[in-house]
Image (cartoon, coloured by chain):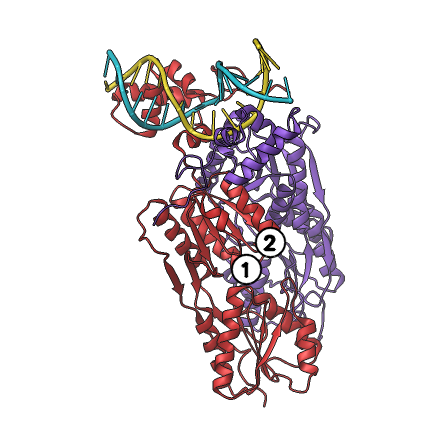
Chain colours: A purple, B red, C cyan, D yellow
Amino acid sequence: MKRASPPSGRPGRPVRVADVAEAAGVSVATVSRTLNNKGRVDPELAARVRDAATRLGYRINGVARNLRRQDTQVWALIIPDINNPFYTAVARGVEDAAQEAGYSVLLGNTDEDEAKEQQYLEVAVQERVAGLILSPRSTTTDLSWFGGSGIPIVVVDRELDRPFDFVTASSYDGAVAATEHLLAQGWRRPACITRPSYAATAEQRRLGYLEVVRRHGLPELVGVVPFHDSGLDVITELMAGDHPPDSLLTVDSMLALGMISALKQLRKPIAAEVGLISFDDSAWAPVIEPPLSVIVQPAYEIGVAAAQLLIGRIRGEAPDGPQRRILDTTLIVRKSSGRSGR
Amino acid sequence: MKRASPPSGRPGRPVRVADVAEAAGVSVATVSRTLNNKGRVDPELAARVRDAATRLGYRINGVARNLRRQDTQVWALIIPDINNPFYTAVARGVEDAAQEAGYSVLLGNTDEDEAKEQQYLEVAVQERVAGLILSPRSTTTDLSWFGGSGIPIVVVDRELDRPFDFVTASSYDGAVAATEHLLAQGWRRPACITRPSYAATAEQRRLGYLEVVRRHGLPELVGVVPFHDSGLDVITELMAGDHPPDSLLTVDSMLALGMISALKQLRKPIAAEVGLISFDDSAWAPVIEPPLSVIVQPAYEIGVAAAQLLIGRIRGEAPDGPQRRILDTTLIVRKSSGRSGR
DNA sequence: TTGAAAGCGCTAACAT
DNA sequence: ATGTTAGCGCTTTCAA
């Protein structure tokens, strides 16, 4: 099969500025200036250039431009797992805002794996991305070597133990509100089903929960579920123990699903016998029976805010110190957290 | 705040091969050869080079490498919407396989918008990506101009009307199986709730459904729901009509959720009064009441297969003509499609 | 306003 | 085995 190639120019090879220049009868400098709308250029010449460019099907070589300009139009977005609906939404927010500002985004999933995380960071520097948006695996993720690259970083969702621009939702407040809501519904033994504490958000939620139960002199019931696990074992054990919880706060939607299916298996009807509320809303939450009460994080907006901070840094318009944007969570009361059938 | 910079080298600027060469007391060629494991190089010199590189914190400039090699390590993945769990899974498959083969992926969401799609295609050529994986908005998406770029393309999920490497699940067969399953359960008036026909998969599913109802001499009940709509209006109208369906086949999970919530509103209990089966499995499908019967597409595997085809093309190992990989769908019978309470 | 030419950082052909 | 150097395609001084 013959390889298609644009008219004129070197056969089988992409068209270059030089080809356009030749076709338009001008110098490469004029072509560059025209196509970039930089400096003054005679309207007539400009027209000839544009005409030649479209005629030849010229597409600028971004790699060469980037090398020359010492700059790229690409961001890296490194997150734990795009399959988690929360991160999916964050990614959309980032992507939409990036796109609008003329950037593209390289996506990396770390799967809570430190090696993968470092590998993606490596790619980010090598590709000389214009900026990085990172949701670190752990509060202690190593970015020391990355600092020297001069690439601006915005941390999302999970905080680092070093100061960076940072966007997240108020996990602590959300957990406090959720726990208090459970108590207001009449539950007396709420438990918090959470993730390993190296994830900053999970830890904040546990702390928020703890604050409330302590203040009320209630027992501290915490179940820690590894990532990529829905928590069946943990809840089964908790329920079988001497002091089973009467209600549950889960820190992500996967855990909520895990609890729903576990409680069904344990024949503990939700709302009737055990209250349930979870972080993160999703399309199915209002549809299931009983509808799931949730604390919503503005995930899309978190992504957008991160993008905006990054743009500020890239343009050098941002203030010197690290900036923080803590977005509010919202409590959406549906049926699962209520106390019915008693 | 002073900008951190690595020891030695030009202050405040990234370390280059030349800096490493100088520090190691060798030529740039030797540095390049060492770091790329190409050609023979004296072990002692190699050691000095590696030492200097790590000492200076050298990170290769991928942009320069790409320009020189006329090649990149990046793919573009252009899909309708990463928020759709099906595409999320495809993206993970692509990303994992890409990563393993040493590529990174640039993500673009088109939102079924032709302009955005063309814009991302433009970015892909400009960045001279090594390959493109595309789920086109429409069977007629214009790729004529893209062909000349020489960038290999693999089409996923939705077929194009022109021949390209293509990976999808057998939508037609899946729809046939689902519809037959509905009939086997005793339902007599299955309807197909689908998407606009320019999306090739939706069209295949409608056709599969049609084949079965025609063969059985049953009425053809089709509701077409625009993208980004859950179908409440369509189902309400269908149910209020003279010939309401007694069961539903939906072509994606968002539609399934739409039907579930619509049927609740219409007080038509699922399974008891109307059967439901949907394309695409999800984490919530087995958990809801009644558990949702589904036709599963191997979404992750579709992504992986697309990546493999792409790698074959890039390496020039693939056969000349376009290749097709049609992966099987699987029927998972749960409760929603059964006929209970009658 | 336009053009000539340097040079971004790297690899690879060529010379040693 | 090692070094020298051209050149990838572009932008941007600088000179005309």
Pointer 1 or 2: first along the chain:
2
Image disc number at residue B138: 1
Task: Provide residue B147's location: percent of width, then percent of height.
Answer: 45, 48
Task: Provide residue A115's location: percent of width, then percent of height.
Answer: 44, 40
Most extreme residue toward the right is: A184
In the figure, A271 relative to A20: above or below? below
Relative to the observer, which residue lies in front, A246 or D8?
D8
Report the residue marked by disc 2.
B114
Task: Provide residue A182's location: percent of width, then percent of height.
Answer: 71, 60
In the figure, C11 relative to B281: above or below? above
Same-chain check, marks 1 and 2: yes
Most extreme residue toward the bottom is: B342
Task: Provide residue C1's location: percent of width, then percent of height.
Answer: 64, 22
Q: Of the residues shown, which amino acid type is indicated by label 2?
A: Glu
Residue density around tag 1, few if under 14, some if 14–19, many if 20 or more, within 10 Å = some
In the figure, A340 relative to A199: above or below? below
Image disc number at residue A257: none
- Tell me the subunit letter for badge 1: B
Q: Could you say which quadrant of the image residue B69 lies in?
A: top left
Instruction: Name the residue rendered at 48%, 40% in the picture.
Output: A117
Instruction: Look at the numbered discs 1 and 2 and tell me whether their residues touch, using CB distance below 8 Å.
Output: yes
